[in-house]
Image (cartoon, helix red, strand yellow):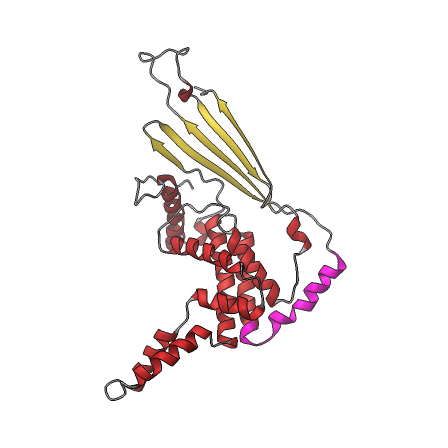
Amino acid sequence: MRVDSLTSSLRGLRQSALAELRAFATLGLTALILGDNAIGEICSSEPYDVQSGGQLGTTRVYIAARYPRLASANELDHVDFTLPRILADDKSATARVFALRWYEKGLRSIYPIDRLLAFFIAMETIVSAHADTAGPVPQEIARKTMWKPVIDAQKPIIDSDTRGKALTSITQTSLGERVNFYLDRTGLPAPLYDQFRIARDRRNDVIHGNVTDVQMSDPSGAEQLAAAILKHEMGLLGAMSWESHPRSLITTLNWQYAPRAGPAETTEAQAPPSQYQKISFRMDLTKDDSHQAEHIAEDPR
């Protein structure tokens, strides 16, 4: 099945990014009505902008690369050692189970927007459960101290249930406060909060519909934060050996095509450079290693 989506600019968003998002939404609508058997794997997605000077487009090919590696006996022991931390029957273990499920989904996802949301949910699951079990968070205590006498003074006119809900609403903590509480109680590096802040702002942009063009680099902070928190939860120290190996191969093709002028306007010899096709390639082999190349190719027409 081929899905074509056309759109004009909307609130400053890139037209191509919005069109691609709507194409994905069309697949979701198809699955909602016809069932998930009606959609399959996405072979390619090629968003492009049509402007007066030509067409600008990007084609990304996401290839999940799995490099064979011999696991050491020590690494396998780590698996055996950490399993009880997700098999226990308590709130913290349940949170770890859900967090690891979302972390795994993030690693398997090839689209940046899916990775960003998955890693963020993994992180949020842990810190929220920790606030419930190890709290209360200091800000919650401070708010309750300030507002409980004020709300209790309304007993003659407000029933107990309504007062309780009002106090809960006023004293509830923000996600940022819960993250700070987690980092402080666990002793994890404070700069991880900067990773959270960047990931939170990007996630908010996505879920509030303020951005559609999520880049492959956007989920990296959320992934690093989720991994650091999960390692602490599972009693793992330092970097895992697999983290130094290549993980994914992404080839990005950016192209620019300007229509050739008509015969009455110019001749072949007079055609300016803008009448040629500009192509740039980028290959992201790992998080920190990439290669780029760019060349001008003559219009095949």
Q: Position of residue 26 (x, y in %)?
A: 37, 47
- Tell me the quarter of the picture where residue 176 sits: bottom left
Answer yes or no: is residue 80 visible.
yes
Q: Position of residue 195 (x, y in %)?
A: 50, 56
Q: Is residue 81 left or right of residue 263?
A: right
Q: Position of residue 287 (x, y in %)?
A: 58, 46
Relative height, residue 262 to residue 177 (above, below): above
Relative height, residue 145 to residue 5 (above, below): below
Q: Where are the magenta residues, as a range? A: 72-92
Quadrant placement of the C terminus: top left
Answer yes or no: is residue 161 visible.
no
What secondary structure do most residues of the magenta stretch adopt?
helix
Q: Is residue 57 left or right of residue 12?
A: right
- Tell me the quarter of the picture where residue 89 sits: bottom right
Quadrant placement of the N terminus: top left
Residue at position x 42%, y 55% in the image: 201
